[in-house]
Structure formats: C-alpha cells, structure tokens
Image (cartoon, coloured by chain):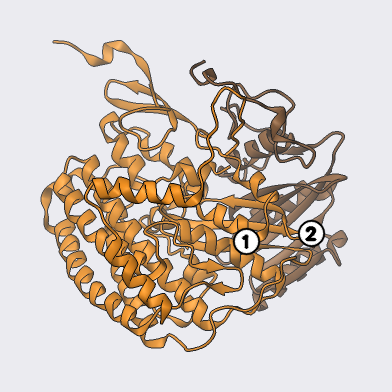
Amino acid sequence: MHDIHDFGDVKVPVGPQHPALKEPESFLITLRGEKITAMSIRMGYNHRGIEKACEERSYIQSMYLLERVCGICSHSHSTCYVQAVEEIAALDVPRRAKYIRTLVGELERIHSHLLWLGVAGHEIGFDTLLMYSWRDREIVMDLLAKLTGNRVNYGINTIGGVRRDVTSDQMKDVLRSMDLLEERTKYYIELAQDEITLAKRLSGVGKLTYDDVIKLGAVGPTARASGIARDIRKDDPYAAYGELDFKVITDDHCDVFGRTVVRLKELLESYKIIRQISEKMPEGPLTVRAPRKIPEGEAIARYEAPRGEDVHYVKSNGTERPDRVKVRAPTLANIQAVARMLEDGYLADMPIVIAAIDPCFSCTDRTTLINDTGLRKKETMDWATLRSLGIESYKRRGVCFDKLNRKLEKGLKK
Amino acid sequence: MADETKIKEELESKFGYLKDKTVLKRDRRIYVDINAENFHEVFQYIAKNMHFNALPAVIGLDEGATFGIIYVLCKDGSVLLDLKVHLDKSDPEIESVSKYFLSADAYERELTDLLGIRVKGLPNGPRYPLPDDWPAGEYPLRKDWKGSRCEVSEGDNNA
C-alpha cells in the first residue's frame, strides 16, 4: 500500500492568487500527509495607501475614502472615523442621528452575516444554503438602497450627524422585512442544530480555545464563539447602543460550528435592536454644524463591526486636513488566530476555517497609490457620461432602477 | 470613572515620573505620556500586573521632530489605555512587545515598513504591509515622503 507519510514534510504555497481565496493573501503551508503541521501568512496584497491619502484630504473627503476601505462593513469604518473626529471637535451629535446610524449599522450587520452564511455554505459544498441566504440578503440590500440611496457604501454619515432622514413609511418597510427575515433566520438556526451534515462538517474544525483568543487577541464572533463575551456595543457603547436592550451572544463550541451559531443568533438580536429603534427613535435635527477646521487633538474610536472590533485613531492639527488617521480592522486581529485554528487540521478544512473568521483583507491592508508612469493612456470622462454608461450597462443585463429613481426623486421634491 | 481613577492612582504611585503625565480624557480612556527609557518597565507592569489583556492597536506617528508610538492597551474589553512614547528621529528604535501580546507582530511590522522605526526582538517573518520589491529607505507615512518617489512600472508584478 501507498503510504502518504513517506513523503515527509511537503510545503504548499496557497495564494496570493488561488481558487480557494476570495481576496489576494498568501499562505505557506507545511503538510505531513493531509495534515497541516505549520503555516505562515503573508499579507499586504491589498495595501492601497489609504491612511496616507487621508492626510492629503479634508475631513469630509477622508470620510468618503475611509468608507471605501471595505465594501461590506463600509458603514462601520465611516462611523468609527466620524466618531473620532466628533470627539476631538466636541460635537454633540443629535440623538436622532445616532439612532439612524445604529439602524444602518445593524442592517449592515444583517447583510454581512447573511453573506457570510452563504459563503460558509459554499465552502463546504452546501450551495443550497448560499442560494437561500443570499436571496434573503437581497431584502436587506433593497432596504439599504431605499434608506440611503446605495446598496453598498451608504454615505449616510457626515461629520456631526447623518445626511438623510428615515420616514415612518420607510420604517414600516423595515419592520415588515425584519419579520420575514426573523422567520428565515429561525429556520437556519433549526437547520444548524438539526441538520446532521452541517454539524458534522463544522464541529471540531478550526479549534480555538478561550486561552488562545486571549493570547492572540481575536475579536468579534470569532472570540464570542470561544466563550468570550466581548462586544464593543456593550463594553464601550457608542451611537444609540447605550439605550438599547440586547444580548451579547456567546457559544462554547470553540470551532467553526460555534462561529456559525453565534452569527445566526446575532441576527436575531439585530432584528430586536431594529424593532427598538423603531419604537424609540426620537424626533429632532439630523446634524449639528461641524467646523471645517478641526481643533488640535486626538481620539480613538471603537466600533463593533460585523467581523469584530474596528479601531480608528484620528489626530488633528487645527487645519482642515487630518494629521494622521489609523485604521485597525478586525481581520488583522483575527488573522493571527487562523494559524492556530489550522494547526493539526486537514488541508481540506482550510477554506472553511479561513472563511470562518469572515476575513476582509482589503480592510486589513487598507492603505491607492496609483502612479501614472505615462505608459497608460489617460481618458477623462465626466460624471454624467460615466453615470449614463453605468445605467445602460445594467439595463442591458436586465437591471433597471428607473422606478426606484422616480420614487426617490418624488420623495426629494416633497 | 472609579476604575479609571484607580488605574491612574496605581500607575502614579508605582512610577513617580508618571505624575502629571497620566490624564483621564473621558470615560474608559486613559492617556499616558512616557519617555523612551521608562517605556519598557511601565509597559511590562501594565501588561502583567494590571489585567490589561489586549492590545487592539499600535499607532505610529510622525510628529515632526520625533516619532511617536501609541500602544493602545485594553482592559476587559472596556477601558483603553493609550501609552504614548516618543523616539528620537536620528535613531528610532524600540523594543518589541510581541512577547506580551502575540497580536503585536503585524502592528510592529507596520511601524518598520511605513515609518522606518526599527523594532528590536521581533521574530523573523515576512514584511507587512508593503511589497517585497519596495525600494529601501522609502517610508510612506513620514511627512516628508512623496508618492512620486516610488514609481512602479507596469509588468513588475510577476517578478
């Protein structure tokens, strides 16, 4: 018989470009047979120089740039950043604005967790789950588009408040969708607990003990699935979270199964939070006037993004541009735990174990240096041409926003 | 702020030179300014004896005449302590804290790549976050650095 152990240690590079990875990142894995004995990680392939770019932009321009650090938790980054700026400028953000930020933040969490559930399903060959959960995710995406005008990069924040109000009709829409999503989520929880294939495939995979989390500094659902009740919404309340009642979900499976359960149950908490927002949303203004020049100072803001703790540091020097902006995205805190999770695991488990921290490497690497060396031809296109090109391209594919746009325009005229 | 006040008092009684250097900025935010020579003993004490069990971020700054590094330490997920240390620009070197927090690894490599601060005692490993063929001596987060100095020609990516 052929003995696979005869080969001794085999080194396998995975990435930076690899079918199993959704973003460029490089892993060097040492294998003995099918088992992983060691691995090293090289990150940085998504480094775009955003922190440096912020130093050359005004506070408000930086906010829009930082929103684009990530396509999924964009609101997390923009909120975290404005909170730091508002703290330095000692702005008293209106309560209604805080509630609207919280509402968009929770909708974002729902969209992110449902997206994750689909990806996780896909990674273990359970593509029906991907189809189901991504269908449900569309409900949230539509809500976000209705409320903010955008499916991603919502642009709802501004320094000192929010840019758009939420009408009571919109809120009714949101609540109706929450009922529907709650029913769907309960079905997924039932599925996770009763469906033997899911439990068998995910249990014991990607083990991370309580002590490992503390030592490696993992955050978010990854930490909470190892029994650590850490959640910035509770530990360091921001926006409207101090006035809302919700549970920090933990689980003690310490594996990918636990991480699935935590995210699913967190969805239920998000629906609960959104219902409370609807009841408690105070009337009042949406913004306070923010100065263009922010007085000298520094502040650190924290935000519980769908993937865990997001940290933004802003230092101002009295001008209209920040002196320094630093972003610590949750994936950078979690990626170091991945090596531990994979140790002694199987190579075949790698995609799902990496997916289980819900990694976002563009967040992690942030930082675009585009240098035109003269080789590339430049073409300038005005905004209207660019926009109509986009609309035409979508129409050819059967996607049309005309009706929604008319509705939005009507709403704006009122 | 009872907890925060206690932390401030403990630090000031243990290290005399921290008097007037420890500021409670608001709820859950403590700020400590410290000299490079005292840095390690204070950091060790906070990490080992004061239950600060997480290091959410290490932030490098170009302060003009000096480099600044802020070590953000966290207690039980809630209280943040910012330990700010200043380094001379002519010879910026600091000892690694990765022996207390494994998570420090990536943060400290950022200091080296983006600001050119040498970190003593970091275990061997790949650089982060700049590419392997990044020109030596170019540190993007330094205030005098300009992007045009590092032009990347097309087709280099497959090297």
- Which residue has dot 1 on it? A60
Q: Tell me, what hue is chain B?
A: brown
The chain assigned the colour orange in the figure is: A
Left or right relative to B12: residue A308: left
Q: Nearer the viewer, residue A233 or A318?
A: A318
Q: Quadrant of the C terminus of chain A?
A: bottom left
Q: At 65% from the left edge and 55% from the top edge, which residue is drawn?
A: B72
Amino acid type, callout 1: Ile
| Residue A289, image x, y percentages | 65, 77
Left or right relative to A400: residue A369: right
Left or right relative to A36: residue A78: right
- Which residue has dot 2 on it? A317
Residue A265 in view in this figure: no
Q: Nearer the viewer, residue B138 or B128?
A: B138
| Residue A306, image x, y percentages | 41, 58
Q: Quadrant of residue A411?
A: bottom left
| Residue A180, image x, y percentages | 19, 71
